[in-house]
Structures are given as C-alpha cells and as structure tokens.
Image: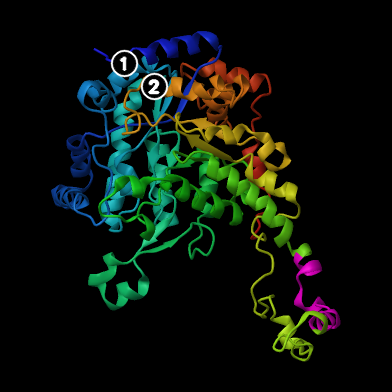
Amino acid sequence: MYQVGEPVESVSKIRDAIDYPIIDADAHVIEARFALHDFVKQIAGPDVLKAFEARQERRNKTAQRNGFWASPSGEMTIDRATVMLPGLYYERLAEAGIDFAFIYTSEGLSAQQIREPEMRQTLHRALNMLYADMFGPYADRMTASAVIPMHSPEEALAELEFAVGELGLKTVSIPGEWRGPVPEVAAAAPELADKTMEIHSFTIDSEMDYDPFWRRCVELGVAITGHGGSQSTARRMSPDNFVYNRLGSFGVGNEHLCRSMFMGGVTRRFPTLNFGFLEGGVGWASALYNDLCEFWEKRNVGYLKDHMDPAKLNVELMVAMFEKYGNDYLTAERISIRENADNLFSFHWEDDRSLDDFRFCQAVSEEDIRDLFIPNFYFGCEADDRMNAVGFNSELNHFDVKLKALFSSDIGHWDVPDIRLPVAEAHELVEKDLITDDDFRSFMFKNVAELHVQMDPDFFKGTAVEDAVQKLVDDGEIILPDHKAALTQPSAAE
C-alpha cells in the first residue's frame, strides 16, 4: 500500500530505544463538510446552513490566497481518509509511532474570525458537537480540542460551559486576537465595514475584560491553546502566493497572543493557567522571552528614573561639550536653553500615562520575567523545524532556562505528506546532536503531559498513557499546582 518504507523502519527503531510514550500535541481532523452541515442545520436551521454554504463559496474567491491542495492525496489518499475517520485514525496511530494524540480543528481556524454573530456561534457549536460525537469512542488514545469564539467574554464563556460542561471536551482552542470592522466606518458606511479591519488583543488596550474567561478555564481545569495565525493582516494578503502569506504566520500570531498575555498580566493574575501556542515553533518564543528580559533591564521604572529622567540632564556638561565639539549651528548658546536640552533625544513630554509598562504583570525584577513566562507557556513545534533546538539550548536563554517545546505533528495538513514521517523527523535533532535524549523525551512526552495534567490531574485517566503520566507526577517531574489557592490571591487590578 505504501511507497515510502523507510519512515516505518525509523519509527520502529526510535520506539524500541525509548521507554516512554509519545504524545502528539497537535494533530488535525479534516471535517467532512457534509457532516458539519448536518450539525449546522440541526442547531440553526436551513437558512443559516444556506448562508454558511454561501460563505464557504466566497472563501474560495477572497483577495487573499488561502491554503489550497492542503491535504494528502494521490498515493497517500489513505492519510486523507485517516484524518476524516476517527476509527481509522485510531488504528493508524501506532503506525505513526504515536500513543496519544490531541486533535485540533481545521474549519475552526477560520470560523473563529467570522464577524456575523449567529454564524460564528452556530459554527463553533456545530464543530464542538461534531468533535465530541466523532472522537468520544476513542478517548483512550485521542481527544479533540473544543473551539471557542472570543468576540466577547460572554460569548467565550457560553461556549466554554457547553463544550466542557455538557460535551465533556477537555481542552480548548482560541483565536490569537480580536478582529472586527473599524467602528467609525461601520457606523458611517455599514456597506464598507467588511472592507476594514481593526485588531486588538484580549488584554492590552482591550475594552473588554476577559479575566472571567481565564478564571473559568482554571476552575474547569482546561489548558488554553491556540493556532494564532496572522494571515489576515495587511502584510500577508497576497492574492497570488500562499507560501508568501503562510511563512511565519503562526509564529507572528502566536507571538502577539503570548506577548499580550504576558504584558497584560494574565500569568500574574492566574499563575496556574497553562497556555499552548501551537504550530508556530519555538524560535519566536525564545526571541520574545529574551527580549522581555533585556527590555526590563532598560525599561523598568527604577532604571528609567535613575538613568533616563530628562530632569536629571546635566545641562552644564552638555554646554561644555557643545562648546568643545559643536559647530556654527550646534552651539553652546542654543543647547543651554533647557527646553532644547530636554528634547535633544529624550522624547520627553508630560502626560497621565504610567511610566511602568510592566505594571500589569507587576514585574519588579528580571527574575519575575522568567517566573511569569517559563512555567505557563508551551510551544507547539512541527517535527521538521530545525529551530526546535533553540528551545532546548539553555545557553541562549536568560537564566539558562529551556522553553517548553511540544511535539506537534500537524498530521492532516499539507506539510505532513505521510503520517509516518513526523516522529522520525523530530528525532533527527538528536541524531545531529542538536538536542539530547532527555530533551527529546521532554519534547515528545513530558512537556505536553505537563501542559494538561497540571490543569487537571485526571486528564489522562483511562487513556493509554495514564500510567506513564502518573509516574511523572509520582517521581516529582511534574508538580501539580494548587489552583484553588492561586485563585484566592488578589489580582493586579485589586
């Protein structure tokens, strides 16, 4: 049946050499649209279904070149069938070298940015009902992640309660940002609203308070994950070139979500809430973490007041230097005017904004940056990404830390032409001495187990990996936090 035999042999050798299971943090389902249509019709009726079908047709005619020929075909048609049929998926996981897989949406990635409320809410509800029904019988080796609309906290909470409380889904996926029309345009010319876009985060400068949503996720014991793509931003809107639009898009989108969560103080207010940023790799995360440390060194309030306060400018020294090194227009007389000296390069003006850009996360030391970033954030990495090694190179990162990279196969999509490839591709970093065997174990098993079991100690109960995950807890490799105690601590706002 298969034309490529080598990956199967490679996976067998890898599995024989390790004594732990492999957990895939990010495999995908390809939804059969006719099945999705059944659930849309069941929830909202034939009129909404008709509108949804029309929307799907419009998606193929947008100004942006979206993904096309995006799933396996030809000699690997079996892989296309696999990711559409959970029973077949279940049977073939062992062939891929995977013991347990988290299954993520395909249709939901675009559904999360639908602007029309009824359509958006209906589609999320339909997808979650579809996933619960399809994957429920195979819960010992697969679990599907719910999709959550985030257009408002109320909308997010409603679907969270339904997906987790009623359907029993155990993890959730959110978009990377809020997108909508420019309000002034929508008010003045509604017919042009869809031609405009305003983007903001769920924390920094948001007019809405999403803290009730983050809190409820802690209470329900669900990690928050997301494929924070940025394809719809203006710089990724080529009408002709999908690769141009796609390159780095998930990294850019995830960086925006992660940066806003950190700077918005979410990890300070909810220190036991875990976040998984999927499909963008870990290179951007290393850059963000190190940038945060380095920015804090030069932009914390103490440093600013000691070294950057324009009121402390030594005008006499400035005059002396201009006298010695000036010219006919850079004169001592001109710099001696205090106003000129203040504005030389200080960009100094008075307003009511705080000097402390780190006030929401309440960082008072560089160690705080580490402690508010490293424990909470996990980064999904596709197997063939060489930059995965960056996450495990502690010499690159402040305080010699390793970032929590996750094996994320992306099975089902165009970048996995054969589901038997990802495990072998991931192991190539060990073979090339770019990561250690211990790093590989963290990548393929421990980190993704920790992401979810820290939120819910019973997450893997009844699964094929239950005993192995419990051993991590028993041996102290995974520390289970006290969520209840953490939620009783005063927040930054309080």
Residue 247: mark in rendering: none
* Distance of label 1 from label 2 (alpha carbons): 10 Å
Asked where in the image residue 132 lies, by quadrant, the reply is: top left
**Image position of 464 (left or right of 237):** right
SS class, disc 2: loop
* Label 1 CA crowd tier, 10 Å (few <14, some 14–19, many 20+): few
- How many numbered badges does the structure rendering display? 2
Asked where in the image residue 179 lies, by quadrant, the reply is: bottom left
Horizontal and vertical percent for residue 123? 28, 46
Residue 268 seen by the camera = no
Residue 295 seen by the camera = yes
Indicate yes or no whether the magenta region holds residue 286.
no
Residue 421: mark in rendering: 2
Residue under the image location 60 percent in, 56 percent down? 263
Horizontal and vertical percent for residue 254? 48, 47
Mark 1 and mark 2 lie on one chain; the one further toward the N terminus is 1
Indicate yes or no whether the magenta region holds residue 316.
yes
Residue under the image location 45 percent in, 21 percent down? 423
Position of the N terminus, as image quadrant, is top left
SS class, disc 1: loop
Q: Amino acid at mark 1?
A: Val
Q: Which residue is mark 1?
A: 4
Position of the C terminus, as image quadrant, is bottom right
Query: Magenta segment range?
Result: 304-322
Location of residue 220 with respect to 338 vertically, above or below:
above
Looking at the rendered image, the disc whose residue lies closer to the viewer, 1 or 2, is 1
Residue under the image location 59 percent in, 47 percent down? 287
